[in-house]
Image (cartoon, coloured by chain):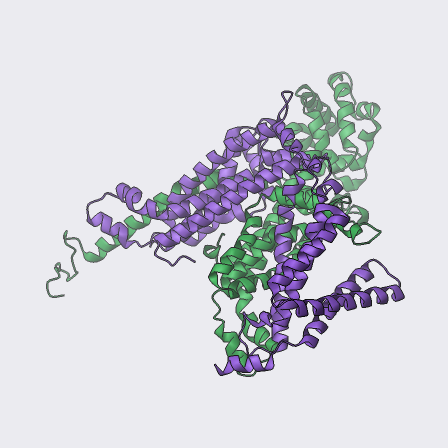
């Protein structure tokens, strides 16, 4: 109790604090923008000064006119948004209205000291500043992680053959968007290289996955037995396809598979991809099995179940999530693989990644945007599946869902 | 122990009457057998589909083959006759060697192998490709009984048969095994005086290896710089929020490598989104972000970042937050508390993530190929180029072997430091 009272005593809303902070941030942004545009020193000073005065005045007016952030955000956002609509269309309304609303929220957030809410109140000002600085840094990294993947999606609906946003797209003009690249993906009667490649991927990946999962699961069960001679060495060997650079595996497979006459066939590519998928299955299934309660199999045996029945009725249902997510890893490994299929396969086994690789290296065609979007959607679906499997597995193992 | 059965020597017996020790050993052996039997199918599969191909590649790097045949099998007589000739004598090989060359070339021409042979020697001495190709038909027209002496006859067909360097190359590369691919892979060559460095302007592979390692190190450092705060934030947040943010890390991890590379290729272009935004901000000059090392670092840091964040996160999750608070309450400044208390506990994660990223980066092919341009390519790209464009499989295999050694050393360190059993996914 004492602490909260101290806080409200020392940290009363103070107009000078809020205004100076708003002015500082606005001034820094204006200075950066001006510098980047290469303004003259006097011009730069005028621009920055004007921005600071304008923002402080706006903040002061808002603090007087509104009692809470919500009202300020709505009114300011709508007013500025209408101005933006008049000046630069729908996109202008969204951008400027949004910026204005964000500004109002920021002013009230500072003024009411709401920024102190999520942290203990004994922190010093520097620590508070660091707390938010740290989150801004992390936010930028998350942006860097996710932006390149999401930006593909709107770009793929471009009506033009450009790889950037056209003015029509920025104005949210329906004429700027089309499904054209998706139609290209489907191909014409003359030739449908993308669909053929997609079909090849869908033939190769499931077989490779099946092979990797069935052999990998058995081996993982063997590896988690209490007494395994050379366990470390065997594990190292089974995981090595994941570590050895793909170009080396591909080169070796090219030589060897030519000699045993499977180079340039579906069988060769499937065998190669299965080998590459094995480590993922071994790792995930071993991890699942390591927390498997072996007394369950003993109990089953005690009640008269033979080992095969025990495996299918007791062990398998419990480790199934691990097996499935290992399988998904193996699937995506095959589905995403270029180098090995380039060397081990022939034109008849051209997979989707192969087609994309050629498309990117030679003449970069906008159809790639559509393909990439489809693949992003597939990966979102796969990620969701794996996440659900992981949670299910943790529930089954009696761990708290996190 | 009152009722344990014992035999005449006083050994404890199991229920079936065998000594207990023996019985336990048998059970253990059976258990080991069962484990091995379960592992055996996969082990066999991986050995056949993966380990033997790698072995094949290692062999390729020292086998002296022209196409699919060994060189000495294609020129058996020359290989035998040229033994006694010493290039250092400064004289051309004796008549028997020339005669043997005519005999072997006639057979090779009939079986259409002479061009392969020429190409093989061309890797060592440029110009021998055309020598063999042009000589094939005319040599096959020579009559072994009447057209001698063959030294004059061959030189008559092509002056280059009188070139001592070419004969020295043939002598040096007439065995079943050769180290010339490895020499080429480290920018060395064998000339008439012995093994020497290549001319400085022809030394490309060492430079490429150094560049691969350097760029991989830069990328590893960048992933650490960006990944550390994110992993810390994830470890610091309550589980529900952390799981939500973790999806932002896992989505790139699950997205196709080609999608991410193509998206960077599109973003970084001269007319791409980033440059358009840059110009909109008021800049006049567009940035050149693609087809150089900067582009490779930007794109590969993005692609490999999850491999850094995930191991770091799993280590940081185990560090109790009370340690930092304790340090501060004992008078440490924020920086000291981080640097002396928190950071040392995360070094295991840094080692794990850093090695993983470095190992993966060293072997990268697709991203450097598509966004690297001329000065951003890695050694993988050169290996592929040797395969697809030049067809010098021996050199490709030698480069691959060197790279494999580098990666295996790192793998060993990783195993020592982290333990391969501790590799986690997702």
What is the tally of numbered marks visible in this picture?
A: 0
Residue A233 left/right relative to B264: left
> Is A173 placed above or below A48 here?
above
Which chain, by letter, is purple? A
> Is B89 placed above or below A45 here?
above
In the rendering, at what x and y percent does residue B198 appear?
Answer: 77, 47
In the rendering, at what x and y percent does residue B379 appear?
Answer: 68, 46
Q: Residue at x 10, y 62 (%)?
A: B3
Q: Nearer the viewer, residue B244 or B165?
A: B244
> Is B99 placed above or below B266 here?
above
Q: Residue at x 70, y 44 (%)?
A: B265
Q: Nearer the viewer, residue A129 or A385?
A: A129
Q: Residue at x 48, y 54 (%)?
A: B424
Query: Farthest residue in the front direction?
Result: A65
In the rendering, at what x and y percent does residue B238 appear?
Answer: 48, 64
Which chain, by letter, is green? B
> Is A17 placed above or below A398 here?
below
Residue A318 left/right relative to B187: left
* Quadrant into which the N terminus of chain B falls: bottom left
Residue B290 appears in the picture as rendered: no
Q: Residue at x 52, y 41 (%)?
A: A332
Q: Nearer the viewer, residue A163 or B5?
A: A163
Q: Nearer the viewer, residue B414 or B206?
A: B414
In the rendering, at what x and y percent does residue A34 appear?
Answer: 82, 61
Residue B192 appears in the picture as rendered: yes
Q: Say which quarter of the image contains residue B160.
A: top right
């Amino acid at each position: 109790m004492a602490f909260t009272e101290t806080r409200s005593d020392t940290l009363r809303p103070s107009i000078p604090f809020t205004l100076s902070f708003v002015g500082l941030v606005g001034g820094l942004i204006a200075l950066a923008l001006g510098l980047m545009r290469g303004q003259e020193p006097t011009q730069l000073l005028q621009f920055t000064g004007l921005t600071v005065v304008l923002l402080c005045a706006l903040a002061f007016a808002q603090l007087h006119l509104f009692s809470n952030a919500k009202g300020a955000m709505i009114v300011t956002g709508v007013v500025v948004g209408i101005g933006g609509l008049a000046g630069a269309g729908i996109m202008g309304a969204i951008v400027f209205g949004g910026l204005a609303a964000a500004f109002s929220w920021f002013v009230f957030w500072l003024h009411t000291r709401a920024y102190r809410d999520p942290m203990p109140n004994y922190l010093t000002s520097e620590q508070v500043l660091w707390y938010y600085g740290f989150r801004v840094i992390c936010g930028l990294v998350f942006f860097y992680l996710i932006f390149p993947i999401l930006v593909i999606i709107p770009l793929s609906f471009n009506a033009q053959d450009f790889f950037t946003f056209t003015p029509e797209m920025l104005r949210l003009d329906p004429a700027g968007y089309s499904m054209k690249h998706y139609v290209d993906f489907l191909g014409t009667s003359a030739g449908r290289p993308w669909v053929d490649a997609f079909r090849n991927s869908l033939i190769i990946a499931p077989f490779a996955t099946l092979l990797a999962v069935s052999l990998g699961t058995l081996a993982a069960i063997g590896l988690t037995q209490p007494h395994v001679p050379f366990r470390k060495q065997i594990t190292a060997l089974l995981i090595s396809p994941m570590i050895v650079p793909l170009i080396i595996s591909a080169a070796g497979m090219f030589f060897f598979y030519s000699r045993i006459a499977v180079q340039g066939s579906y069988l060769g590519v499937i065998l190669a991809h299965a080998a590459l998928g094995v480590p993922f299955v071994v790792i995930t299934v071993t991890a699942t099995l390591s927390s498997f309660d072996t007394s369950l199999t003993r109990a089953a045996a005690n009640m008269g179940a033979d080992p095969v029945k025990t495996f299918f009725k007791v062990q398998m249902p419990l480790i199934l999530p691990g097996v499935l997510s290992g399988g998904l890893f193996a699937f995506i490994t095959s589905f995403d693989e270029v180098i090995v299929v380039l060397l081990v396969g022939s034109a008849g086994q051209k997979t989707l990644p192969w087609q994309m690789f050629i498309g990117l290296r030679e003449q970069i065609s906008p159809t790639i945007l559509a393909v990439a979007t489809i693949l992003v959607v597939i990966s979102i679906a796969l990620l969701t599946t794996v996440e659900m499997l992981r949670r299910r597995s943790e529930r089954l193992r009696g761990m708290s869902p996190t | 122990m009152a009722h344990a059965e014992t035999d005449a020597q006083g050994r404890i017996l199991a229920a079936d009457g065998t000594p207990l020790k023996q019985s336990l050993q048998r059970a253990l052996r059976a258990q080991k057998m069962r484990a091995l039997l379960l592992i055996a199918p996969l082990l066999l599969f991986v050995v056949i589909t993966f380990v033997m191909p790698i072995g094949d590649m290692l062999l390729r790097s020292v086998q002296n083959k022209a196409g699919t045949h060994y060189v000495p099998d294609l020129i058996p007589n020359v290989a035998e006759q040229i033994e006694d000739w010493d290039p250092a004598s400064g004289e051309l090989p004796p008549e028997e060697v020339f005669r043997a060359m005519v005999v072997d070339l006639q057979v090779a021409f009939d079986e259409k192998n002479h061009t392969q042979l020429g190409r093989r020697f061309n890797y060592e001495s440029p110009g021998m490709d055309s020598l063999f190709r042009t000589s094939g038909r005319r040599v096959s027209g020579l009559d072994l009984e009447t057209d001698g002496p063959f030294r004059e006859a061959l030189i008559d067909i092509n002056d280059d048969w009188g070139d001592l360097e070419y004969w020295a190359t043939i002598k040096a590369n007439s065995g079943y095994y050769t180290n010339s691919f490895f020499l080429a892979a480290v920018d060395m060559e064998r000339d008439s005086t012995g093994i020497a460095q290549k001319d400085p302007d022809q030394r490309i592979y060492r430079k490429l290896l150094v560049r691969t390692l350097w760029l991989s190190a830069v990328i590893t450092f960048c992933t650490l710089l960006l990944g550390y705060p994110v992993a810390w934030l994830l470890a610091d947040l309550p589980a529900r929020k952390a799981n939500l943010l973790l999806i932002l890390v896992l989505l790139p991890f699950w997205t196709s490598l080609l999608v991410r590379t193509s998206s960077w290729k599109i973003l970084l272009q001269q007319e791409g989104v980033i440059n358009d935004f840059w110009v909109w901000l008021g800049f006049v000059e567009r940035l050149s972000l693609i087809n150089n090392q900067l582009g490779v670092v930007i794109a590969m840091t993005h692609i490999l970042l999850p491999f850094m964040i995930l191991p770091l996160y799993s280590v940081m999750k185990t560090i109790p937050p009370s340690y930092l608070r304790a340090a501060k309450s004992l008078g440490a400044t924020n920086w000291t508390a981080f640097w002396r208390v928190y950071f040392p506990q995360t070094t295991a994660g840094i080692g794990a993530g850093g090695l993983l990223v470095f190992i993966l980066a060293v072997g990268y092919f697709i991203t450097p190929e598509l966004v690297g341009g001329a000065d951003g390519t890695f050694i993988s790209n050169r290996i592929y180029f040797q395969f697809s464009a030049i067809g010098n499989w021996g050199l490709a295999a030698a480069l691959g072997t060197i790279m494999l050694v580098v990666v295996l050393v790192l793998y060993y360190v990783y195993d020592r430091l982290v333990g391969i059993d501790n590799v986690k996914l997702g």
